[in-house]
Amino acid sequence: MQIEQLVAEIKKSGAKKVMVQLPMGLRTRTAEMAGALEKENISAIFSLNPCYGACDTADEEAKQAGCELLIHVGHSKFYRNFDTAVPVIYFPWTSEIAFGSIDFSPMKEKRIGLLTTIQHLSALSGVKEMLEKEGKEAVIGGQVLGCWFANADKIADRVDAFLYVGSGRFHPLGIGNRKIYALDIETMKVEEVDTMHLEKRRYANIYNAKDAKTFAILVTTKKGQNNLLGAAETVRERLEQAGKRAFVVVMNEINDAALTGIKADAFINTACPRIVEDSFSKPIINVEDVEKIFEC
Ligand code: SF4
C-alpha cells in the first residue's frame, strides 16, 4: 500500500528519472520499489548512504546522477528550510500499530502529553482513548524529531508527564529534563526514561573541555545540519580571544573514527546536537555550550 502511494506521488510529479533515498529499515523493499517504478516507466536509483533524518538529503547525489527529483523516504520535511540541488518529495512511510492491552500503571501522573515520530502519528488518538479509559487526561502533542521538540513545548504546561509512543530511546531521551515515559511498540511496555545520565555526561564533557588548549570545531556537509558554518568561525574567534588554539574541520559523517589523527584536546560540534551522545576519545561539546567552559 505504501509503495503504491509512493509510486503515485512520483507519477504525479511527472519525473522520469528519480533518486530514492531510503532509511536502513526499508532497504529490504528496494527491489519491490524498483519493480513498481519500472512498470510506470520511471527509472529509479536508490541512495543507500546512512541517513538519520530529513536534515540529510541526497539531493547532490541525485543531481550528479542526472535525476530530476529526490524522493526522501522515512521522514517529513525538516523543520528548518534549506536549498536543495533538485526538488525533494518527502515520503514519511507511515505504519499502523496493533495495540493489545497496555499496562499504563508505571505512570502515576494524571495529565499525559503524547508524542511520537511522523510514522506513528495516527496511533496517538488510540493511545489517548486508552489512557482516558484509565481515568487519565491525555493531550496529543504530535511529532518530535531527535533535535526538535516544539510539539512537546507547546503542551508542557498542560501536562504532568509525557508519553513517547515508538521504538527505541533516541527521541524520548532528547526531550530531556522532564518526566517522560516511553511506550515501546515492540514490547508494548511502558517504562520511565532516565534522561539524567545524558545531562551528567554533557556537564562532564564541558568540565573536561575547560582545560583543553586546542579545539577542533566540527562542521558537517549535511545540508540541514550545516547552517552553523558562520557560527564555527565566530566560535573559533571566541576561543582564540580566550587564549586557545582552534581550527575548523569539515566532514560528512562526524564520528570518532573520522577524527583519527586530528591533534586537538577537545571537539566543538556544530552539527546534529545528538552526535555528542556517541562515543568520542576526546571531550566533545555542542556549540551552544561553548560559553560554559569559561564558567567552570
Ligand atoms: S536529531 Fe540530528 S539526525 Fe535527527 S533530524 Fe535532528 S539533526 Fe537530523
Image: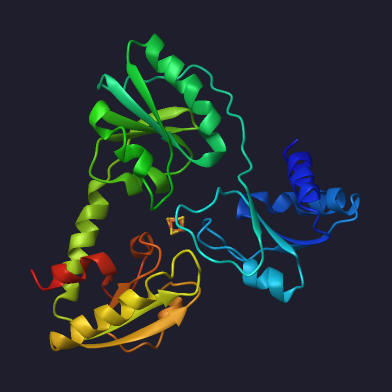
Eyeballing the image, is 255 above or below 156?
Answer: below
Q: Is residue 164 left or right of residue 287?
A: right
Residue occupying the point 29% across, 86% down: 264
When asked about the image quadrant of residue 204, the answer is bottom left
- Residue projecting furthest to the left: 296
Task: Specify the quarter for ligand 1.
Answer: bottom left
**Residue 237's spot in the image, x, y percent?**
23, 85
Q: Position of residue 11 (x, y in %)?
A: 81, 49
Image quadrant containing the C terminus: bottom left
Colour scheme of the picture: rainbow
Q: Which quadrant of the rendered structure holds the N terminus?
A: top right
Image side of residue 13 versus residue 215, left or right: right
Number of numbered tags placed on the structure image: 0
Coordinates of residue 152 in the picture (x, y in percent):
34, 38
For the point 55% across and 48% down, the residue is: 76
Relative to residue 184, is residue 47 depicted above or below? below
Task: Give how far across and how far down residue 294 sits, in percent.
Answer: 10, 73
- From this view, report whether residue 254 is shown above or below residue 120: below
Q: Name the residue nearer the viewer: 261 or 83.
A: 83
Q: Is residue 81 left or right of residue 49?
A: left
Residue at image coords 28%, 42%: 194
Q: Nearer the viewer, residue 112 or 88?
A: 88
Look at 26% across and 73% down and name the residue there: 283
Residue 72 sits in quarter: bottom right
Residue 265 visible in rendering: no
Is residue 52 visible in the rendered structure shown here? Answer: yes
